[in-house]
Amino acid sequence: HTMQALRQLLRAELVDLSGALGRLVDDPAELIERLHRLRSACGFCGAARLGAQAKVLQGHVRETRIVVPDALARFRAELDATLAALSATG
């Protein structure tokens, strides 16, 4: 029951993050913070691939202070795949 609850919380976070990404590309500091929190949640829920993409994007934004469209697209693709997997498992 605990894992299911954690996954439901992760799913809600991913839905929110997906909708906020357009705004967050203009706020690198907030994006870095959101990705940091997401990486923690991914660790608890077994979403290793999304956590890895979040780490890559977080490092990129931390270094450059901008979001390259290709990096964001790779992250979004993994975010969407994770959302689909979470929806399929209930």
Image (cartoon, grey):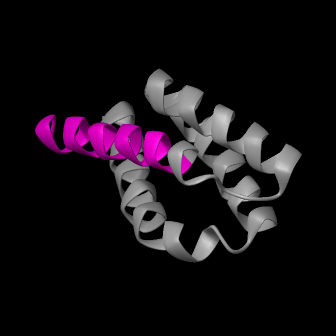
Q: Does the magenta stretch include residue 86?
A: yes
State the residue at coordinates (43%, 67%): 16
Q: In which quarter of the image is residue 13?
A: bottom left
Residue 62: x, y in percent? 84, 48
Residue nearer the viewer, 16 or 10: 16
Residue 55 lies in magenta, yes or no? no
Snapshot quadrant of residue 33: bottom right
Q: How many marks?
A: 0
Q: Where is residue 79 in the image (x, y as percent from the top left)?
A: 39, 44
Q: Does 86 sit above or below residue 34?
A: above
Q: What residue is shown at x 41% (from left), y 62% (from top)?
A: 18
Q: Residue furthest right?
A: 63
Residue at 36%, 42% (x, y): give it. 77
The residue stretch that appears in magenta: 72-90
Q: Residue at x 57, y 77 (%)?
A: 23
Residue 56 lies left or right of residue 70; in this view the side is right
Front-most of residues 74 and 78: 74
Where residue 85 sits in the image (x, y, percent)?
22, 35
Expressed as whole percent of the image width and height from the top left, the position of residue 5 reads 35, 44
Quarter of the image where the C terminus is located: top left
80 versus 4 height, above or below = below
Main secondary structure of the magenta stretch: helix
Taking the image as shown, residue 14 lies to the left or right of residue 62, namely: left
Q: In which quarter of the image is the N terminus?
A: top left
Instruction: Give left or right: position of 74 versus 38.
Output: left
